[in-house]
Image (spheres, coloured by chain):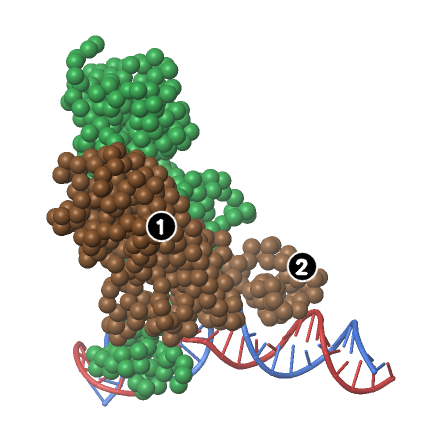
Chain colours: A green, B brown, C red, D blue
Amino acid sequence: MKHRPTIRDVAKKAGLSLSTVSLVINNRGNVSPGTRESVQKVIRELAYHPTRSARGLASKTSGNIGFILSEEHFSQAEPFYTRIFLGTEFEARDHNYYILLTTVGNQFDPDEYVPRFLLERNVDGIIIAGKVNEKLISHIDSLGLPIVLVDYEIKRAHHSAVLIDNWRGATLAVEHLLSLGHKRIAFVGGDIRHPSITDRHEAYQNTLHMAGVFLEESYEVTDEEETSVAGGTSSAERLFASGAKPTAIFAANDAMAIGCMRYLKSRGMSIPQDIAIVGFDDIEISSHIEPHLTTIRVLKEEMGKIAVQRVVDSINAKTKTVVTTHVPVELIVRESTVALAHVED
Amino acid sequence: MKHRPTIRDVAKKAGLSLSTVSLVINNRGNVSPGTRESVQKVIRELAYHPTRSARGLASKTSGNIGFILSEEHFSQAEPFYTRIFLGTEFEARDHNYYILLTTVGNQFDPDEYVPRFLLERNVDGIIIAGKVNEKLISHIDSLGLPIVLVDYEIKRAHHSAVLIDNWRGATLAVEHLLSLGHKRIAFVGGDIRHPSITDRHEAYQNTLHMAGVFLEESYEVTDEEETSVAGGTSSAERLFASGAKPTAIFAANDAMAIGCMRYLKSRGMSIPQDIAIVGFDDIEISSHIEPHLTTIRVLKEEMGKIAVQRVVDSINAKTKTVVTTHVPVELIVRESTVALAHVED
DNA sequence: CCATAATATCAAAACGTTTCGATGCCCAGC
DNA sequence: GCTGGGCATCGAAACGTTTTGATATTATGG
């Protein structure tokens, strides 16, 4: 008996059939309490543990959850989606799943490349973080795998999603600036086609509108390709080149806010005295950069955690139900915002 | 034909046996070029792809690599090992492996808890990051799985390891301070039992010794439990309480350096004018904190990458060979160090 | 030209589970 | 006393590959 014990060994020692042992292992079927207990005893004695691949083959189940992220988001420094991913790793453990990570390009052609774990039937459900090609999503749908979207949304198709309360976050941010006396509040957007950014933009406009503040178009820079630090710098540059004279900037995320700060500093403006600035996401750097950035806190790990719960629910559910969760946000006031010194305008 | 094609379908359509098709798939055995090609053609036509669990069951192989991290290191904020982990995720993709992550406590009792992927035979090799219980390591050894250690080392047992060039890094750091005219250079250590910290400590002592600098024991604080920000703060406090009058501090890692900075600032000392400080690791915060921290850069993602290469090599190798890699380090001079203003002593 | 070796292919067994349908049993209901 | 139905258990098939050993064919060397 050099080999690891198999379910066969357990059955033999317990004097029962394979099927009964299997039923005990999976807590299923009608097994008498006495039998159940004696099987469990034998399992303990032999230190038996079922093999994942055998189990997978027989039950068409993998015990894994696929995590899909677009390549551009999984850059070394990406502080946002990476956190969500780590959140899923934590939570998966408690549900006895493992996370398989893959990245995908912006394009998707099922004849060209399909994530390996899909081809190999190696996942029971999928978590998609951020924006990916919709063809990929419908391809996964056609495989019948449960999908949970994180920080992304698709209008027509119905999928469970874990979303940021972007509208409220952006509203909090702009109201904070308004309450400090700012009126000429610029918006710096990045990739405005991402649903999250779109929402933040609209909430920005709405909040100003409700407050009776009307600004020229030049106060909104929304044609930047990348919602990144570099994008923030170039957006800030164009903002000021356009002739706008903001006293505050609301950036669509912390990366862009940091990019703006970089530009402002390079032009000798001081933050927050000359320009106040608010970000969104509360990535780790934000609390260390100088001045510490006022921002909207998003619970990134929490989003990953919820995503795992959702996808596990879907895997176990017989009936397909979609659930959309909006995780709450919080305004974190730090040093990059201060009351407007002298009221102009 | 509603189902996914199996290897059987391929064999039938190609007019060959299962075995031959399998040989083609795995690029093995003697298959005539013509046959090989026609099989590949059929595979393409049917869009066939082998199933992971079936393959796993038959070949006793999982296609996964286990990543083990101690719980305390996988805290939400842990910026060091998390990076190594992400590095492995990247690299694994290129080798057609997936990474399964698990955390373990400081204690290890094989009768109590064993990582699930070991019980389920769901990994082909193991990467261990940082310090974990040695009993766990020998338990894995007894399973016959290849192990690669990252940022950890065990004297007696021989395992492949990916290590930081701690000696050189610490030497660079201290020499940098010496070259700026500092002599009273304190060392703040944290968990001195971790091999990496030990090495840094010894290199610190050696470098001072070579330079003919001799300091009292009070300049070394090495009895802190945690190599963390909090540990840094409390170490700094005790350093100054001991009567030492350092003009510079070499902290065993960035977290501790940041902790020290926190203490120094709270006591109204200015960095680097009153006290220069050097860290180790170059975590992301270090380039954003004020003043930007001078430190030793460690290529964390690179370490993860190398670890994957090593473990994949070991998996494929018939003969067990151990390889130790020291990844190079680099001194990054930022704002927290400056030449000593007036020479004392 | 024969013996041996290398090449190409195949049939069958093995991998370790889950699941399906069958079977016997005991008990409730009429 | 018979019938139908849940309960507990079982035997066998199924899951989709790889691997092993056999066999037929072709090449190689003396």
Mark number, residue B171: 1
- Pick the front one: B67 or B57: B67
* Image location (x, y in percent) of residue A77: 37, 41
* Image location (x, y in percent) of residue B263: 16, 42
Q: Say which residue appears at 24% left-offset and 53% top-offset.
A: B189
Looking at the figure, which quarter contains the C terminus of chain B? Answer: top left
* Image location (x, y in percent) of residue A127: 36, 49
Marked residue nearer the N-terminal end (1 or 2): 2
- Outermost left residue: B241
In terms of secondary structure, where does tag 1 sit? helix
Mark 2, chain letter? B
Instruction: Name above or below for residue B198 compared with residue A282.
Output: below
Q: Is residue A287 visible?
A: no
Q: Say which residue appears at 60% left-offset and 54% top-offset.
A: B45
Q: Is residue A15 visible?
A: yes
Give a yes or no on whether discs 1 and 2 share a subunit: yes
In terms of secondary structure, where does tag 2 sit? helix
Where does label 2 land, which residue? B37
Q: Say which residue appears at 13% left-offset and 48% top-offset.
A: B243
**Label 1, label 2: how far apart the Cα atoms are:** 58 Å
- Pick the front one: B17 or B136: B136
**Kind of residue at badge 1:** Thr
**Kind of residue at badge 2:** Glu
The local crowd at label 1, few if under 14, some if 14 to 19, many if 20 or more residues have their Cα within 10 Å, is: many
* Image location (x, y in percent) of residue B80: 32, 50
Q: Say which residue appears at 40% left-offset and 48% top-offset.
A: B329
Q: Horizontal placement of A272 versus D19: left or right?
A: left
- Pick the front one: A242 or A311: A242
Are discs 1 and 2 less than 8 Å apart at CB? Answer: no
Which label lies toward us, 1 or 2? 1
